[in-house]
């Protein structure tokens, strides 16, 4: 059995050429970069997934997040609201009175042109805010 010396490739091929520490380092870094890119989705931005049941039946209402402002409006019970972030900064659509999340819905960060949907099944007033920019507030009134 042959002994592998520092700088030699493994195996029994006598024609194998030695490699340098630079090749080993850069090969390892390239592999780690590829693994990291794959783990992060190849660099694509993450778009929050809709709340379960948000896309089935009922009416829909679009709401735009722009100029660091959230909309307030009235809808019917069973309506699905889809927020679209038109700002270059990330925003959230988080239920509650700023800065206190009440647990009803939370989009997490919505990047530019990203969307988030939530279906409002019961009547009432639903205040919401951007958890990144807590001064951004709005209210959805459901009849």
Image: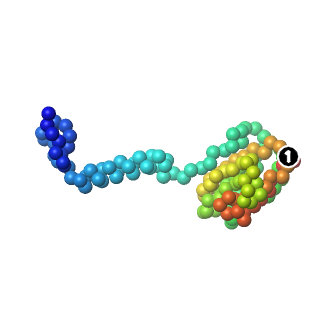
Q: Position of residue 8 (x, y in %)?
A: 18, 45
Q: Is residue 11 above or below residue 19?
A: above
Which colour scheme appears in the figure?
A: rainbow
Left or right: residue 50 compared with residue 77: left
SS category of the residue bearing label 1: loop
Q: Quadrant of residue 121?
A: top right
Q: Is residue 121 visible?
A: yes
Q: Quadrant of residue 109?
A: bottom right
Pick out the residue farthest to the left: 14
Query: Quarter holding the N terminus?
Result: top left
Left or right: residue 107 compared with residue 143: left
Q: Is residue 86 visible?
A: no
Q: Position of residue 82 (x, y in %)?
A: 71, 50
| Residue located 70% across and 54% down the image | 93
Q: Quadrant of residue 100?
A: bottom right
Q: Who is closer to the viewer here, 94 or 55? A: 94
| Residue located 34% across and 51% down the image | 30
Q: Which residue is mark 1?
A: 123
| Residue located 19% across and 49% down the image | 7
Left or right: residue 130 compared with residue 23: right
Q: Position of residue 61 (x, y in %)?
A: 76, 50
Q: Is residue 43 above or below residue 58?
A: below
| Residue located 77% across and 57% down the image | 97
Q: Who is closer to the viewer here, 35 or 100? A: 100
Instruction: Count how many numbered circles sit on residues in the image.
Output: 1
Q: Is residue 56 above or below residue 65?
A: above
Dot 1: within a 10 Å radius of its alpha carbon, few (fewer than 14), some, or many (20 or more) residues?
Answer: some
Q: Position of residue 15 (x, y in %)?
A: 13, 41
Left or right: residue 9 compared with residue 45: left
């Amino acid at each position: 059995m042959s002994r592998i010396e520092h700088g030699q490739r493994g195996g029994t091929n006598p024609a194998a050429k030695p490699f340098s520490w630079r090749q080993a380092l850069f090969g390892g870094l390239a592999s780690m970069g590829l693994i990291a890119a794959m783990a992060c989705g190849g660099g694509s931005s993450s778009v929050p997934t809709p709340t379960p049941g948000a896309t089935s039946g009922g009416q829909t209402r679009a709401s735009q997040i722009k100029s660091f402002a959230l909309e307030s409006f009235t809808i019917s019970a069973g309506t699905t609201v889809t927020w679209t972030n038109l700002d270059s900064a990330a925003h959230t659509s988080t239920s509650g009175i700023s800065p206190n999340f009440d647990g009803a819905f939370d989009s997490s960060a919505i990047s530019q042109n990203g969307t988030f949907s939530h279906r409002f099944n019961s009547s009432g007033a639903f205040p919401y805010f951007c958890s990144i920019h807590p001064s951004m507030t709005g209210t959805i009134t459901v009849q």
